[in-house]
Image (spheres, rainbow, N blue to C red):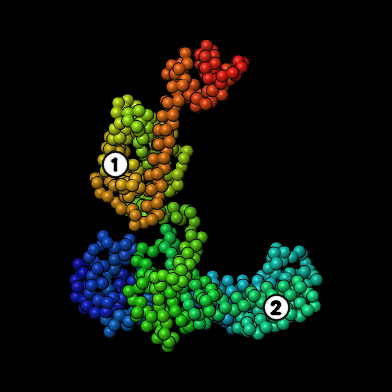
Amino acid sequence: MTLEELKEKARALPLRPGVYIMQDVHHEVIYVGKAKALKNRVSQYFQDAASHTEKTRAMVGQIDTFDVIVAESEFEALVLESALIKRHQPRYNILLKDDKGYPYIRVAMENGMLRLSLATRAVEDGARYFGPYGSRGSTQGIIEALRRALKLPSCNKKFPRDQGKGRPCLNFHMGLCDGYCRAEADMAMYQEAAQQAIRLMEGEFKQVGEELLAEMAQAAEALQFERAAQLRDRYQAIELLGKRQKVLSGSLADTDVVGVYRGDAKTCFVVLHYIEGELAAKDWQLLQTPMEEELSDIVSSLVRQYYGARSRLPKQILLPCELEDEVPLARMLSERVERRVYVITPQRGAKAELIQLANLNAKEEAERATSREERQSRLLELLAKMLGLQTPPVRMESYDISNQGASDIVASMVVYVNARPRKRDYRHFKLRDMEQADDYAAMKQVLTRRFQRYLEGDARFAELPDLLLIDGGESHARVALGVLEELGLQIPVVGMVKDDRHRTRALVTPTGAEIGIQANQAVFALIGQIQEETHRFAITFHRQQQSLRVKGSELDKISGVGPKRRTQLLRHFKSVKRVKAATLEELEQVVPKQVAQAVFEALQPKGAGKP
């Protein structure tokens, strides 16, 4: 269907709640959504493309036709949408992906060793399977916690064949394993620990805990304090493990706290599980692409998928933002477990602090899983999208003018490569033949000199930038564009605009189109950093030039030292202070002996002896 045909079909839809199903030319379902009023919602896709996110524009470009299912209420539409998303897994919907499904823990005795491992499904192979659990990461955490609580080996050695062969590994020396591979190890203790592991997987936390407490008391009475301390640590670890496994296996928790973080390269969804006010477990999942949708849409979709596969739900679920479909969502969850499930968006107090903690955990997981290169790449992609560039600007050059009247007019060139400063490419310029301060003329001279050197083959200016950032507004950007056109170069140019408080506000094109960057914090921070760095580099050089000129007056008082000799001395020694500290022989290497003698005598402290 053409775009006009799609528009016409959308306009004919009823103003009733329902579900719409977008399909491509191959009749594959690419998106499923719900609406309070089908006509209004579906029509939006085919009207104002400029307001769409990049993902939505891409999706709309793939739509060949769509179907709708009218529902009696928004609640029915929500339930139907969830079922259709689960069935079709449309590529443009927000999806919690786990290609291995919900995992099991496989428990088996193999070659005298207890083997604990993840399994995608339970099969008839003589082993025991426990689960299914939540995410693979959380389930693997259960296995590791079980091993550490009972100090079970995680190696591939076989008992009794490998007992006494070789040295115990680092885990034994770190206290993470009891070292049953040692020749003197008590294998009866190993068998006891292995059986305790199986009992714990069966849920006998209370019974095993009571046995450990009794054994701990006996060890204390026998003055075996080290053994008693080991049993105490094991008891505490098992108690925490019991709460954690209870949550992950789908048993009832008091409160689940949802957190979401949208990073520059990845998005993370986190659920913190609380039992009796104590944090028992954390479940999280990374989505490998950043999310451009509204936060409420992201949370709604992820929460419905996460809890849709669970038969046991907590008493209350705390959300990081209000949802448009919060009421039907709570009803859907409540009907599934045949009791009231409260869906709450706390605004203040202890519950709001729990949301902050969940969001922080989501951020930590996303940042930890995102490399610096991924963040930089995504950041430059966003900047390119804002500026309408075909490719991300890998190399950016920024320019600023610094002056005080007509004296010591200087400019700075700062270079960023892959969103990081490359200081070896920074350059200073001292403006020539400037009778008065004129920022536009100064900018024209600096850019002409810089790109003229490129055209002449100067190795220090051999690389062309992918983007020019000019400190100033539309007029400054227009001057830069004029220089490039005169030299026959094509490089994108934008000005960096500041607000009344001299802080970065926006970017502006040579034609005066202002580009807001404050909506994306990462891009806003990068442009602000570049602008501040360019200004700092310019003002520092300007002050150095002023200092040389002002301090040079002390040398001007010395007989035989004129502007030329003063410049020679300052260029060689860098400052008047170093000229004062120089020996007569060092001065004679820069200026004639007679002048060196005059400088040496004039700058020596009173009372100092002659060489």
Q: Earlier in the sequence, mark 1 or mark 2?
A: 2
Q: Nearer the viewer, residue 588 or 418?
A: 588
Q: Residue 193: x, y in percent? A: 70, 78
Is residue 27 visible in the rendered image? The answer is no
Residue at 39% across, 73% down: 345
Question: Looking at this rendering, what residue extends furthest in the bottom direction?
Answer: 338
Q: Residue 106: x, y in percent? A: 60, 78
Q: Quadrant of the N terminus?
A: bottom left
Label 2, secondary structure: give it.
Answer: helix
Residue at 45% across, 47% down: 420
- 301 left or right, relative to 74: right
Is residue 347 visible in the rendered image? The answer is yes
Residue that mark 1 sits on? 477
- 120 left or right, relative to 342: right
Q: Nearer the viewer, residue 29 or 387?
A: 387
Residue that mark 2 sits on? 193
Q: CA distance from mark 1 to mark 2?
A: 73 Å
- 495 left or right, relative to 416: left
Quick one: label 2, few (<14), some, or many (20+) residues within 10 Å?
Answer: some
